Image (tube, helix red, strand yellow):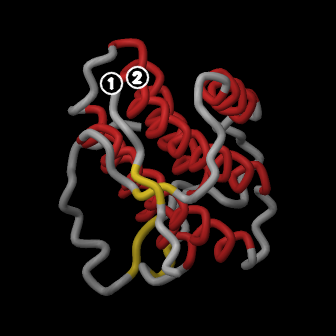
Amino acid sequence: MRISKVTTKTGDKGETGLGDGKRISKSHPNIELLGDIDELNSVLGLAITNCANQDMIKELKSIQQDLLNMGGEVSMPESEIELLSENRIIFLEDMIEKMNLTLPPLKEFILPGGDEFSARIHLTRAVCRRVERSCVTFIDTGVDKKHWLRYLNRLSDYFFVLARFTTQNIGGSETFWERNS
């Protein structure tokens, strides 16, 4: 697909086109999910601009590709095409396990923060959780794409562990939640 014209004026009345050519309201759960995926990808892109580790940048950009693949599937919900591979869920699980082995167990909740990159990853994680909620709403309309939910759930876990991992690797410290007594 080549996009040669951005302004088409076809959405001026509150509808937009899906990848399969079908037109739906911009308030439809499908479009909400697409918008949230786009926002997640953008927030992740912002975090990447503050990352100095080239291997991590490569890993995060591969996740951006996953999000575009997921968006492709969302834009054609009735299609059997699977652009987001189950292997990517396994990839996230492997990365989570690898990073988690180096981290101390949590005894309390942590406050998002650390260095700037870790804070941006925490923000990315929070946006990912919203995408997951939008995905549930869309799937509740009858779309059978449960692998999207598994991917998003692992992805938010990945971002949480990555933020902790990064904070630890720069020699920073996590700020723990203090219970009011």
In front of the other: 78 or 125: 125
- Of all residues, the one furthest to the front in this rendering is 181
| Quadrant of the image occupied by residue 38 | bottom left
Name the kind of residue labelled 1 in the image: Ile
Q: Residue at image x 81%, y 62%?
A: 144
Q: Are marks 2 and 1 in contact (CB under 8 Å)?
A: yes
The vertical placement of 88 against 154, above or below, is above
| Residue at mark 2 to residue at mark 1: CA–CA distance | 4 Å
Element type at mark 1: loop
Mark 2, residue position:
169
The percent position of residue 48, horizontal first and vertical second, equals: 29, 33
Residue at the (55%, 68%) spot, across then down: 22
From the top left corner, tell me how far across and down residue 14 is, in percent.
35, 84
Residue furthest to the top:
55
Q: Position of residue 131 (x, y in %)?
A: 53, 63
**In the figure, is residue 159 to the left or right of 78?**
left
